[in-house]
Amino acid sequence: MIDHCGVFATDFAKSKSFYDAAFAPLGAKVLMTVPTEHTGGKGYIGYGQNKPDFWVVEAAEAGPGRHYAFKAKTRAEVDAFYKAAMAAGGRDNGAPGLRPHYHATYYGAFVFDPDGNNVEAVCHAPE
């Protein structure tokens, strides 16, 4: 149902470094950079695997925190996402593990990005 979404970043370079590292294990990378002459001089990048699905936009204020969950094919990808996100300056909001209160094979990891958004990688497949 969702075509794309995004977050505001108060430190664009720091957020770009965070998402570059966190998304690499999920096979996502920057696929599009909007030229600054079209954005009023602000950084504007789109991440994805096949098309830009998740946008990071430079802003003076980030606004209230949000939650975004990204699909992982395997539990190992969830683990690698968490490790990369934490190494890139993320803050723990739930180490990799089963969350059976969602469903029996829900395996996820949660990290706060530099602006306090709750970013998750989740694998629904059994081990």
Image (spheres, helix red, strand yellow):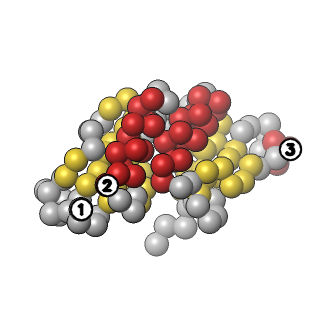
Category of crowding for the residue at label 2, using alpha-carbon neighbours closer than 10 angstroms: few (below 14), some (14–19), many (at least 20): many
Q: Amino acid at mark 2?
A: Arg
x, y percent for residue 42: 74, 37
Q: Secondary structure at mark 2?
A: helix
Earlier sequence position, callout 1 versus callout 2: 2
In the picture of the structure, the residue carrying the numbered disc 1 is: 127
- Frontmost of labels 3 and 1 is 1
- Frontmost of labels 3 and 2 is 2
Q: Secondary structure at mark 1?
A: loop
- Quarter residue 5 falls in: bottom right
Earlier sequence position, callout 3 versus callout 2: 3
Q: Which mark, by number, is residue 109?
A: none
Tell me if residue 84 can be seen: yes
Q: Nearer the viewer, residue 16 or 49?
A: 49
In the picture of the structure, the residue carrying the numbered disc 3 is: 37
Q: Secondary structure at mark 3?
A: helix
x, y percent for residue 37: 86, 44
x, y percent for residue 1: 46, 72
The residue at 48%/53% (across/down) is 26
Q: Which mark, by number, is residue 75?
A: 2
Cα distance, mark 1 to mark 2?
A: 7 Å
Q: Amino acid at mark 3?
A: Glu
Category of crowding for the residue at label 1, using alpha-carbon neighbours closer than 10 angstroms: few (below 14), some (14–19), many (at least 20): few
- Quarter residue 116 falls in: top left
The residue at 66%/50% (across/down) is 30
The residue at 49%/36% (across/down) is 63
- Quarter residue 101 falls in: bottom left
Category of crowding for the residue at label 3, using alpha-carbon neighbours closer than 10 angstroms: few (below 14), some (14–19), many (at least 20): few
